[in-house]
């Protein structure tokens, strides 16, 4: 870890505990900062809060007192999920105090270079794939970021012989200033998180920050099939390596059912361990491009692609009950992700959908609802989801209050040969702490039914 002097004796407010805030606070103490941690939750009895207090950190829970930000505050490390409309953040911006995320902090101290992966869909799968593939390269991959472990934790032990493979959300990237991944991956871009960013332009701009500080010594792997990605990466200074499902590009591409990299055949798409659908093939192409750039042998890449079965909560097969196959796609937190899930099946589908209302409509689901025989809607958006299903001509629509009811209702409307699919098209935060918790509740409800 680089022992940077910048934070020595600086007054730093860590806004939001969670994993990233906890790790950032410990790192800042090590760097000599005077640290305050604040969270709206009551931290009384929290073992992490006790540990930080023992290190000399001032811990304030139960709200966001305005006096935590003063002209003496030097910098704020903000949890990515906290919006910029938070009163403490707004006050800091009025006072000209830098507001960053722990991605920036981690990059400042890390001796290891970064591979950063962003996009509206497919980040987790692609990040995991890249992590597995880079095990065959010269540097030891450490997978972290939005996928799990906090970056400020792994950055403390990573060396120059390692490479940090980081899944990065728009929330995280928006809080960066000098962050520069040696290899950046931009998978796709479509309307999402507008409740947070305010506009599609602001959302796209946040995503594009992944390549903002790259130099000609760096590499940008990008989706040549996505016009918005091409637009927002047009001015990058990095070396551009495209991937495409539609045409032969100077990078990774699909041709006649085979994945290639610059003319070299890698694997047939029907040999992929993941479900053989277009978005998984696109993720695989992006990962192949990164692995080849990092010097991984084709045989090793091929073995990873054959063995990798996909991620939990992403078109995850759960079980079959009396001829009904259950799939958990809880990570589908937007319309496009659910549309892709619907197009992955040729059997009749019972769709379970709904969740946090971000103000968007669901008309983008209508084409994919043609094979859906019933919709079970829940959460804040259940009325909207139901309206879209009826507009699409779905004959049977049910509104329920929770996941157990949804699974029971779906089974009651199904027949042998049907797919019962949880693919919510919404974030989970109206009823669950995470999409993982929502998916786990689906799995539990299915096994209870069984």
Image: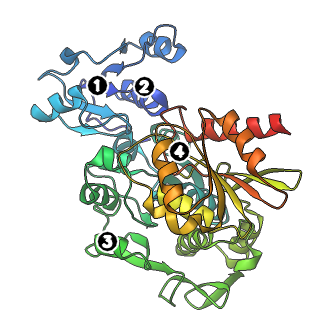
Residue 140 against residue 275 in the figure, above or below = above
Left or right? Give the position of 343 relative to 166.
Answer: right
Label 2 close to label 1 by CB (< 8 Å): no
Name the foreground residue: 34 vs 19. Answer: 19
Mark 3 lies on residue: 233
Residue 121 against residue 61 in the figure, above or below = below
Tell me the residue at 73%/72% (across/down).
272
Mark 4 lies on residue: 354
Label 3 close to label 2 by CB (< 8 Å): no
x, y percent for residue 155: 47, 42
Front position among marks 3 and 4: 4
Q: Which mark is residue 13?
A: 1
In space, the residues marked 3 and 1 are separated at their CA atoms by 33 Å
In space, the residues marked 2 and 1 are separated at their CA atoms by 11 Å
In space, the residues marked 2 and 4 are separated at their CA atoms by 28 Å
N-term-proximal mark, 3 vs 1: 1
Element at badge 3? loop
Label 3 close to label 1 by CB (< 8 Å): no
Tell me the residue at 28%/35% (across/down).
5
Kindly indicate the quadrant of the structure image that contains residue 256. bottom right
Mark 2 lies on residue: 17
Quadrant of the image containing the C terminus: top right
N-term-proximal mark, 4 vs 1: 1
Name the foreground residue: 230 vs 150. Answer: 230
Q: Residues within 10 Å of mark 4 (few under 14, many from 20)?
A: many
Tell me the residue at 54%/14% (across/down).
47
x, y percent for residue 138: 60, 64
Element at badge 4? loop
Front position among marks 2 and 4: 4
């Amino acid at each position: 870890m680089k022992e940077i002097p910048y934070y020595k004796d600086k007054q730093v407010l860590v806004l939001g505990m969670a994993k990233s805030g906890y790790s950032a606070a410990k790192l800042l103490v090590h760097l000599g900062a005077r640290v305050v941690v604040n969270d709206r939750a009551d931290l009384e009895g929290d073992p992490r809060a006790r540990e930080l207090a023992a290190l000399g950190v001032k811990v304030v829970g139960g709200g966001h007192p305005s006096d935590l930000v003063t002209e003496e505050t030097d910098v704020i490390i903000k949890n990515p999920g906290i919006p910029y409309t938070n009163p403490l953040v707004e006050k800091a911006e009025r006072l000209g105090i830098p507001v960053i995320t722990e991605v920036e902090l981690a990059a400042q101290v890390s001796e290891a270079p970064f591979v950063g992966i962003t996009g509206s869909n497919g980040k987790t799968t692609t990040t995991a794939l890249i992590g597995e593939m880079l095990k065959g390269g010269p540097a030891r991959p450490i997978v972290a970021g939005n996928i799990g472990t906090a970056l400020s934790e792994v950055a403390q032990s990573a060396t120059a012989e390692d490479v940090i493979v980081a899944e990065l959300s728009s929330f995280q990237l928006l809080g960066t200033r000098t962050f520069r991944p040696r290899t950046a991956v931009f998978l796709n871009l479509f309307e999402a998180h507008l409740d947070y960013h305010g506009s599609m332009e602001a959302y796209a701009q946040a995503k594009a920050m992944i390549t903002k500080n790259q130099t000609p010594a760096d590499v940008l792997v990008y989706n040549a099939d996505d016009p918005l990605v091409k637009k927002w990466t047009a001015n990058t200074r990095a070396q551009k390596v495209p991937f495409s499902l539609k045409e032969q590009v100077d990078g990774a591409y699909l041709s006649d059912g085979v994945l290639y990299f610059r003319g070299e055949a890698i694997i047939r798409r029907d040999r992929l361990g993941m479900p053989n659908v277009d978005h998984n093939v696109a993720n695989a192409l992006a990962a192949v491009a990164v692995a080849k750039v990092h010097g991984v042998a084709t045989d090793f890449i091929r073995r990873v692609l054959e063995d990798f079965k996909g991620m939990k909560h992403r078109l995850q097969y759960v079980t079959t009950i009396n001829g009904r196959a259950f799939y958990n796609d809880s990570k589908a937190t937007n319309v496009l992700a659910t549309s892709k899930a619907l197009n992955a099946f040729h059997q009749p589908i019972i769709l379970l959908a709904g969740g946090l209302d971000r103000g968007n409509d669901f008309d983008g689901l209508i084409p994919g609802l043609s094979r859906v025989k019933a919709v079970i809607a829940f959460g804040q958006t259940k009325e909207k989801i139901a309206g879209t299903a009826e507009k699409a001509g779905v004959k049977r629509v049910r509104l329920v209050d929770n996941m157990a009811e949804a699974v029971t209702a779906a089974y009651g409307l199904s027949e042998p040969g049907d797919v019962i699919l949880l693919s919510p098209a919404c974030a989970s935060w109206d009823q669950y702490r995470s999409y993982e918790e929502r998916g786990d509740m689906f799995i539990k409800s299915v096994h209870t039914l069984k």
